[in-house]
Image (spheres, rainbow, N blue to C red):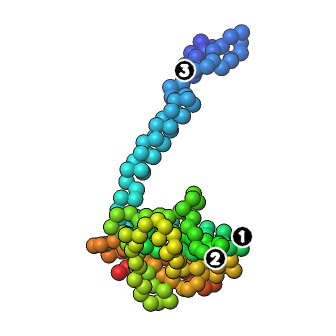
Amino acid sequence: MLTSATGILNRAGLAVHSGRSSPQPSRQTGFSLLELLVVIVIIAILFTYTTLAIRGTSPEELLQTEAQRLDRLLQLALEEAILRGMEYGLEFKPNSYRFLFYAENTWQSLDADKLLHERQLPEDMEFELEIEQIDVLIEADDNADDDEDEERLRPQVFLLSSGEITPEFSVRLVMPGVATSYIVTGSVNGEHQAELSDL
């Protein structure tokens, strides 16, 4: 009887010594913590590369990205205008836009600013601008040299130190052959947003 009980305990991973049982470490098959961490890191790297490879490839995603970027930069410029007590402006070109500030009786560009510098739209993307619900032709000045360009700085939209945006505007981001577009709007009370709009 005792021999049978000892055999059962031995098979269960317990040894009997001096009339009492003590646990013996059994060999466990599985992954160590280090191995699990290595696997997690590898999966994370593969997931990152896959995400980078597929994101932002469709025209709709490009339009959304650019509209949201413009809306966030608009918010940043408006906050800076309020905090600094300065007047800012937003100038649109057919395929680009830039923020300006008013100092020494003239409009000056913010090209040296890390965030509010001039930004080009992706290829084939364009702006369609409305000021107070009236279509506005956005002029390109491809032939203007740098000196003339500085003198011609004139924003279509003003971001005032009072927190107002004037005049009210909406700018549509479009691409040829793409039915989807995005609109960024700004109102006199300082509210603005980027939203989806079907052509």
In this picture, is 101 found above or below 48?
Answer: below
Residue 191 can be seen in this image: no
Residue displayed at 62% across by 74% down = 102
**Residue 115 image offset from top left, x and y in percent:** 57, 60
Callout 3: SS: loop
Say which amino acid is labelled 1.
Leu
Residue 83 - label:
1
Q: Is residue 49 left or right of residue 2?
A: left
First in sequence: mark 3 vs mark 1: 3
Q: Is residue 94 left or right of residue 19?
A: left
Quick one: quadrant of the N terminus? top right
User: How would you rate the neighbour count of disc 3 (Cα within 10 Å): few for under 14, some for 14-19, many for 20 or more?
Assistant: few
Residue placed under numbered mark 2 in the picture: 105
Residue placed under numbered mark 3 in the picture: 27
Residue displayed at 40% across by 72% down = 141
**Residue 180 image offset from top left, x and y in percent:** 36, 74
